[in-house]
Amino acid sequence: DDFFDVAFSTDVGSTSDVVTSLTGYHILKVLAYSETKILGLDDVISPNTSMTIRQYIVEELSQVKQQEAYVNAINDLVAELRRSATVNILYKK
């Protein structure tokens, strides 16, 4: 059985049989179901966190920009070192 099929077909308050997934074996106990809804930018990502969708997007975009700035700085440094480098061959066969 597929993990999600079992998770969504088990009745509230019931416990499933053993379910196999890519990460191992599981026994699921369904405590409650929440209605499906499309989240807005100011909704929290999950009940376990206070982070909103908006905060998550800002954080992800910030990390992408930091990574791009890092890569650009490294590329600029390598280019500058190549321009200013002098190679002396001290030994020839």
Image (cartoon, rainbow, N blue to C red):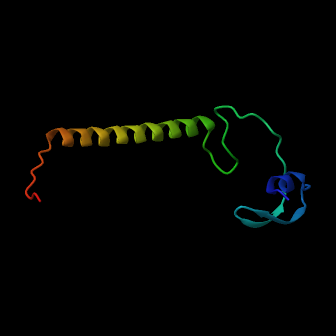
**Farthest residue, direction front:** 93
Question: Could you tell me which residue is drawn at 52 percent across and 36 percent down?
Answer: 58
Which quarter of the figure has residue 56?
top right
Which quarter of the figure has residue 70?
top left
Count up the numbered dots. Answer: 0
Q: Is residue 3 above or below residue 37?
A: below
Question: Could you tell me which residue is drawn at 25 percent across and 43 percent down?
Answer: 78
Q: Where does the image place residue 2, in percent across and percent down from the top left?
A: 82, 56
Nearest the camera: 20 or 13?
20
Nearest the camera: 61 or 21?
21
Nearest the camera: 59 or 66?
66
Q: Is residue 93 above or below residue 57?
A: below
Q: Is residue 93 above or below residue 88?
A: below
- Classify the position of the C terminus by image quarter: bottom left
- Classify the position of the N terminus by image quarter: bottom right
Q: Where does the image place residue 47, in percent across and percent down from the top left?
A: 70, 48
Nearest the camera: 66 or 54?
66
| In the image: residue 22, left or right of residue 93 | right
Q: Where does the image place residue 13, in percent across and percent down from the top left?
A: 90, 59
| In the image: residue 53, left or right of residue 91 | right
Which quarter of the figure has residue 25?
bottom right
Question: Could you tell me which residue is drawn at 68 percent across and 31 percent down?
Answer: 40
| In the image: residue 12, left or right of residue 51 | right
Q: Where does the image place residue 87, in percent across and percent down from the top left?
A: 12, 48
Question: Could you tell me which residue is drawn at 75 percent across and 33 percent down?
Answer: 38
